[in-house]
Amino acid sequence: MARVFLSVKDVSKTFQVGEERVEALRHVSLDVAKGEFVCLIGASGCGKSTLLRIVAGFERPSSGDVRVYDAPISGPGSDRGMVFQDYALFPWMTVRDNIAFGPRQKGLKDTKDIAAKYLEMVGLAKFADRYPYQLSGGMKQRVAIARVLANEASVLLMDEPFGALDALTREQLQDELLEIWARTQVTILFVTHSVEEATLLSDRVVVMTAGPGRIESDNRISLGRPREVSASDFNAVRRNLTERLTSHVSRRQLKRLVA
Amino acid sequence: MIEKAKAVALGAGFPLALVVLWHGAVVSSGTKLVPTPYMVGVMMWDFAFGGVYGDAFSGTIVTHLLASMQRVYGGFLLAVAVGVPLGLAIGKVPLFRQLLDPTLSLLRPIPVTAWLPLSMVFFGLGPRSAIFLVFLGAFYPILLNTIFGVRSVDPRLFEAANMLGCDGARLFRQVVLPAALPSIFTGLRLGHGFAWILIVVGEMTGVPTGLGSVIMDGRTLSRADLVITGMIVIGVAGFLCDRLIVALNNWVLRWSPQHHG
């Protein structure tokens, strides 16, 4: 196994919601190797998004810590780029300026080439001068991905990034993401609640359960790439994962997951 | 095309109908207190170009208009210069909110006209008093809308900026300000409207020039045609300047068509 790159060590997180204390995560540990594609999957409330936000540095763990190459993280940083489900693009900036935002913060004056490179990578060169309101959901998410890549993030944190897209766009973006991943060798931590999406994309699928949130199982996906969702071995892996998920999930939640 | 012509016909036709009604009402009642639209038209011509009455007001429109605009924009720009940065700070920094919000909430309900006597004590009889009153009137809508704008920014945008390496003072200029711009412009438009409304009050403080002082003079001299002329000039100037602000709004907010005026 490769050298540990991203390490989540014994992380717990409790939130105070009014009078109530909610335990979002309990003693979660997870090691991710450089260049690995890891999916976090689980029902609503299992803490998968909270875990992602802690790795991003948006939330502080109540106990435990997160390290990148053994250096504890203390807040948001440009080495870890988040791709939000609702894009969070800067609406007053053109596509080009959104992508160049990170490099500009580092004091780079000429960001044209960087922007051009990543515009090309996500296939939006023709839309460089558009504003976000002029883009479709799929295009917005491409910009969001390009924005963190242009910032030279070594980890992509993706919080149900394709959840708001229609099925066709979703498939297309999954393919493009795999291509980008192969090309840039970026490490990806990807939250989803679709078993199929997790099986299609990742090297490892981490199944989480709710109440309190913790890791139920860590499953290596040994299918070759490219993967075919209709292949029988793909279906076997998917079925196995679904069973792991549902052993802790009620039938009603199951229906939602499968749908 | 036809739709547009219809809109123009309706929008312009209604005030025209009011003018006709005004004329009919004055003629049929035989009043001497209210002039006919024609008499106001003659006064307007004289105010603009002179050559009719040959009195102190003939051909003086530019002098009065410029004097008023200096006070309107002096007060307005001061309100922008104070209201926007203060609003950004109160909206984003809890310390500022805790420090200033109660005081501002206490001062806000006091009508601008109630400040008139004090402003004359502070600033004397003259244009500085007028500028102060215009400033007060324009300040609160600009401040409150800026605060609201900052507070309603999607927190994800701040997170996105943080993770891309933008924080502290840079965050204000690069994210907080632009994200709050739609609300700030709402405040600017409201404040700008109040500034024109308050110019008459501001120029009641005994300044010799300005559209407000023309109206006050007309009242003293019982010249309703002069009063109405002053009112019309303020209305038209305020309207045209509002169009300029709307044009600026639409250009600055070209990334958000839903906020176009």
Image (cartoon, helix red, strand yellow):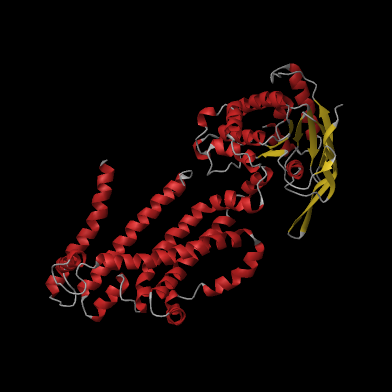
B75 or A43: which is nearer to us?
B75
Q: Is residue B23 left or right of residue A228?
A: left
- Which residue shows up at 73% across the image and 32% down it? A188
Residue B261 appears anywhere in the view: no
Quadrant housing the N terminus of chain B: top left
Is residue B92 depicted above or below A205 in this figure?
below
Point out residue B85 in the picture as x, y percentages from the top left corner.
55, 60
Point out residue A170 in the picture as x, y percentages from the top left corner.
62, 29
Residue A113 appears anywhere in the view: yes
Marker count (numbered): 0
- Which residue shows up at 58% across the image and 39% down it? A98
Is residue A3 depicted above or below B133 in this figure?
above
Q: Is residue B55 left or right of residue A201?
A: left
Point out residue B132 in the picture as x, y percentages from the top left corner.
44, 72
B76 or B109: which is nearer to us?
B76
B65 or A36: which is nearer to us?
B65
A133 or A106: which is nearer to us?
A106
Q: Give the farthest residue toward the front.
A: A109
Q: Is residue A8 left or right of residue B109?
A: right
Q: Indicate the quadrant where residue A102 lies.
A: top right
Is residue A110 depicted above or below B191 in this figure?
above
Q: Is residue B243 left or right of residue B58?
A: right
Point out residue A13 in the picture as x, y percentages from the top left corner.
80, 49
- Which residue shows up at 42% across the image and 48% down it? B250
